[in-house]
Image (cartoon, rainbow, N blue to C red):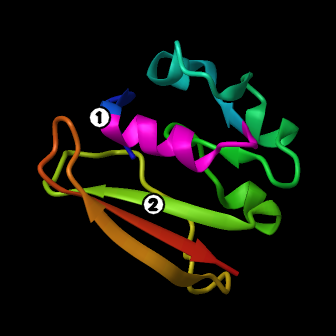
Amino acid sequence: MMFNHRRQSRDRVLNADVIAQCKGARLCISPYSMLLFEGSDADILCDEDFLELAGEGDFCFVEDRELAPYADRIEEVTVYKWNRRYPTDTYFDLDLAALGFKLTSSEEFAGYSHEKITKETYRK
């Protein structure tokens, strides 16, 4: 998810997709992620403790945190994958299959800085 304490990508088409997915719901993010969503019309909660503050039906954009401590509260997971490999030292820490999540949709779209982005959605 990150390398050397930095995000791997800032693709603006991906960010717009996240905002579109959250329409009508609150988007909870860390202060580190705020740069990606500045100027959007999304209902945003920006706080260091956003994962603790998120409520039922809220969306959380996570790029710099472990999710395992919150696994029992997660209703749905959307994973974005790029068409290239980046160096990484912070990894997605959930075993979705072991937690009972099933892939419910997968789609590909062109990003701004990436030829192909794959969006996978998993639900319990």
Q: Is residue 19 above or below residue 66?
A: above
- Residue closest to the eye, 2 or 41: 41
Task: Write down the region rendered in magenta.
Answer: 13-26
Instruction: Name the residue located 29 percent from the left edge and 34 percent from the top edge.
Output: 11
* Displayed quadrant of residue 62: top right
Position of 15 with respect to 100 (left or right) is left
- Earlier residue among tags 2 and 1: 1
Which residue, given by chain and number where applicable, does mark 2 sit on? 79
Residue 11 tag number: 1
Residue at 20%, 45% in the rendered image: 87
Residue 14 in the image: state x and y as whole percent.
Answer: 37, 42
Left/right placement of residue 101 relative to residue 55 reads: left
Element under disc 2: strand
Left or right: where 50 falls relative to 6: right
Q: Quadrant location of residue 61?
A: top right
| Three-letter amino acid code at the position of disc 1 | Asp
